[in-house]
Image (spheres, rainbow, N blue to C red):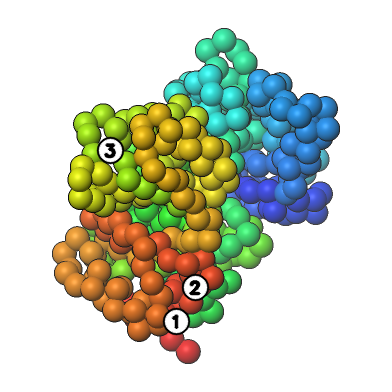
Amino acid sequence: MAIIVQKFGGTSVANPERIRNVAKRVAKNFDQGNDMVVILSAMAGVTDSLIHLAGQMADSPDRRELDVLLATGEQTTAALLAMTLKSMNYPAVSLLGYQAEVVTDHNYSNARILDIGASRIKEMLEKRNIVVVAGFQGTDAEGNITTLGRGGSDTSAVAIAAALKANVCEIYTDVDGVYTADPNVCSKARKLDKISCEEMLEMASLGAKVLHIRSVEFALKHNVTVYVRSSFNEEEGTMVINGDHDMERPVVSGITYSKNEARITLKKVPDQPGIAAKIFSPIADAKINVDMIIQNTRAEGQTDLTFTVPKTEFKKALDIERKVAEQIGAEQVLGDENIAKVSVTGIGMKSHSGVALKMFDCLAAENINITMISTSEIRISCVVEEKKAELAVRVLHTAFGLDREE
């Protein structure tokens, strides 16, 4: 029939009853003649508990040993699901990341997948086994256990689906699909039947929490069809399609926001070649991601440079830039954690003009000030006050005609 990869998140396997429900769903697909590969996250809350436990042992736990510890969460759920399926008289076998030949780089706690051999998975499938794989983990070239960072099980699933040339990769979570906005913020948000990988990649990077961004990157690169569904009902979900053919092209498909943003400004920076590199090199060395960058030229050979970083990295980045400012002769370093990024995304923006103007007019009408702007071919993002972010989402959702019909 088909090769189906199914991934179940932490809430989907949070207790024995939910694990049994997952087993029933997997068994139903197996009974239809499909080859089944199941990727599991740790039970909800387990990873945080393990991190807390590690913190009690050391102020700064060794990253290699932390990965060894964190990998046990997914190992537990993989074994429990395989046990459950076997008790239901289904042939099942659990594999850890290294057994599934998930090869990563050496970056503990945030490793990137380099290759997936998948020969053992294929061998098990040929024998009509249901293969249950511990997500979130792999092994580096030296045989060390590595983990893929938050949301890494999504990436495991899509990468394994790519290696197997699976017909579909189904991501089961506690939401029933991809919405035009966060339903907790915008009551009129509606579920999308389809969305392009390109749009999903933008939305995932801009705050949509349905899929991990690296999993979408894999889907886009390896032409994997991803289907987002709920673990708790049988409703149709959202198909994430590689390419935008066979899809209607709404100008805007979704409104996203992120409050995990902070802004850093260096005042009166010397406007000279090489200065930008001196500002951002230590940030890159600290593995801090920079998002928006704005430079405003002053008179007398000086400029102001502003950029955003994740709020979780704000203090670290601010300390770095204060040292940089002394080295390059900048006058002052300012920081602001009370900001948010609001974005409109849509494949139809490629062929429609006036989206930016409509966004700016809409925010101005609500007295929402814009302090930074960035764009891509299918996305416009604005930095606003954090306290006005949710209002911005709602008014933009209405302005672009995305509200659910009552």
Q: Is residue 399 above or below residue 136?
A: below
* Circle 1 SS class: loop
Q: Which amino acid is tagged 2? A: Lys
Residue at 71% across, 27% down: 60
Residue 388 is marked as: 2
Q: Is the residue marked by circle 2 packed among few (<14), some (14-19), or many (20+) residues within 10 Å?
A: some
Q: CA distance from mark 1 to mark 2?
A: 22 Å
Q: Which amino acid is tagged 3? A: Pro
Residue 270 is marked as: 3
Q: CA distance from mark 3 to mark 2?
A: 34 Å
Q: Do the residues bearing badges 1 and 2 touch, measured as CB atoms within 8 Å?
A: no
Q: Position of residue 206 (x, y in %)?
A: 43, 55
Q: For residue 167, which quarter of the picture? A: top left
Q: Which is closer to the viewer, label 1 or label 2?
A: 2
| 269 lies left or right of 332 | left
Residue at 71% across, 32% down: 70
Q: Nearer the viewer, residue 21 or 185?
A: 185
